[in-house]
Amino acid sequence: MKRKLKIVFILITLSLAGIIVFQLYWTSNAYSVNKKIFDGKVIVAMQLAMDRCKKDYFDSIRTVLVKRLSDPSSVITIDTASKGNTSNNKINPALNINFSFHGSINSNPFQTDAHTYNYYRANINHKATVPEVLTEMSFYVPTLMMELTTFLGVDDAMHPPPELSAFIKTHPGVPSNKWPLPKEGIYALPPNYKQADSLKLSRYFALELQKMNIDAPFILSLSNKGQTPQDFNFHYSETNENVYQYHGFIFLLTHYTRQDEFTLFAKATIHNPQYAVIKGMMITLVLSALLVLFTIYCFYYIIRTINQQKALGELKDDFINNMTHELKTPIATITVAIEGMQKFNALNDPEKTQRYLQTSRNELAKLNELVSKVLDVAAFECDKITLLKEKIQVDALMNELITDEKAKAGKTISIAYNNRDRVDDIVADKLHFGNAILNVLDNAVKYSNEPVDIKIDVYRDGHMIVFSISDKGIGIPATHQGRIFEKFHRVPTGNVHNVKGTGLGLSYVKYIAEAHGGHVTVKSEVNAGSQFIISIPM
Ligand code: ADP
């Protein structure tokens, strides 16, 4: 049995370890997959944030171009019948577009046709003005965009800001990409452009992350040096009424030698991304932890039940052994007594007959007691005991029990009875309550060496009447004190004290005490003695 149990235990431990290892494996796998998804989402969020910034940025260019083209100092003429236009297609006439700004006129008119022009005009919802149509078109026709930039940029290019002119004069050899950034004019950057850009991108990025249910703190860094566009090809900018010029023209001047200075790169650094990933996996993690805990509990429960069954099996074996002894002894004694009467002609000797009969009677009484005990337990096991409660004189009952005990003890015993609070009577079932007290007295005698010294105290404790029975016997080890009230439980004594018993007495005592609305407790010390305290309500 022990070996089998060991094997079961090892198998269960192995399968538990297996389950835990697999759970860990799957969890770590799930973590890496989720981390990859997380990384992907962050990149997408950054791309979307950039796109939003870019859209704002195009809008700002649109505003700049429309504003500049609508300026009174700029004149746009669209000519369909211009000289040199060889097309005579009447359905789709060719168009020549001329710009003049502050009196300067572009040398080559921009050429397109009426279909294209009308197509872009139709792209705009409201009734579009010429500057609006040209602006819209410039986003799709790079040559027109170039034309417009050159044309609109004439202003600053012809009249560089004074500080730039001064710089060029004083630093003749310095290449244009090392010139200081203009502080005003169409090429000027707003002084806080990086901060403004980072704030905007940061806001959009946070919004995109939020949409993806990612709640992680991040730092956004912007740079326009030392990083290659392949790494960070996110070209974006801020749009804000005050700084739109800068945006408009950074975009337009992609061919400009100083474009590095105007091209910003963004980098988002997420703090402890693993926490954000784990947070996202929380439900799965908690469920799998609960599952593992539940499995551990189930296995623990199985092992505990097996152990309990094993212990119960052993107790039952002990019980059968003891019962066999207990039953056999009186039967053997009675058999010997009857044989003695038959074989040795004892019937003619009335005194001998009387002795044999008395012995047989005593043994039968013992047998009866034993059978009643077992039957009592069987009865309370099926809840078949119904208490017949009545008023009982405490002193009378106790004296009767003490006399009975002394009569059957077979040992030298002294019992000191003290009704401390002069309790007159109790309401109890005389037979069962008496049997319970008698069981405790029997034990006190059984588990004490001669001369047996027993003390019985009866007193009131609150609304309870207490019956305390103490002996100076062998005592009960602390580890067993909690279990002696269980059925069949006996303190293993090895072969030292060969005291017979069924292990049923105290479970019966407990049942009866509780059936009366009370309880029983024990205080004991090995080799010093035991005290059983039965309390029932008044
Ligand atoms: P049993 O028939 O074995 O006496 P009980 O249920 O009456 O069964 O008692 C359970 C066990 O408690 C006993 O086997 C004994 O080991 C221990 N026990 C009970 N009363 C005493 C006592 N007064 N002193 C020492 N041990 C006791």
Image: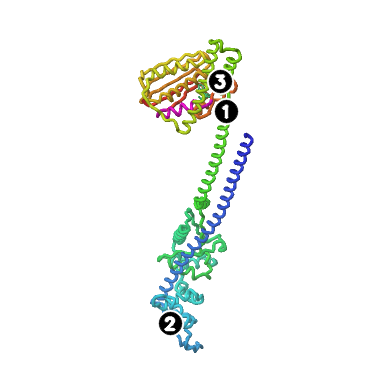
Q: Are marks 2 and 3 in contact (CB under 8 Å)?
A: no
How far across and down, in percent of the image, does residue 400 sit?
Answer: 42, 17
When the figure is inspected, residue 407 is found, relative to residue 237, above or below; the finding is: above
Amino acid type, callout 1: Ile
When asked about the image quadrant of residue 390, the answer is: top left
| Residue position marked by numbered label 2 in the rendering | 77
User: Whole-percent x and y of residue 94?
Assistant: 48, 85
Mark 2–mark 3 distance (CA, rounded to whole Å): 136 Å
Q: Main secondary structure of the magenta part?
A: helix
Q: Amino acid at mark 3?
A: Pro
Is residue 99 or residue 30 the one in the foreground?
30
Q: Residue at x 48, y 73 (%)?
A: 139
Q: Which residues are magenta?
A: 502-518
Image height check: is 406 above or below 126?
above
Identify the residue at horizontal 56%, vertical 61% (top origin): 231
The Cα–Cα distance between marks 3 and 1, rounded to whole angstroms, is 16 Å
Residue tagged by mark 1?
Answer: 320
Instruction: Give the quarter of the image for residue 500.
Output: top right
Q: Secondary structure at mark 1?
A: helix
Q: Nearer the viewer, residue 206 or 431?
A: 431
| For marks 2 and 3 on the same chain, the one whose residue lies earlier in the sequence | 2
Q: Amino acid at mark 2?
A: Thr
Specify few, some or many for label 1: CA neighbours under 10 Å numbering under 14, 14-19, or 20 or more: few
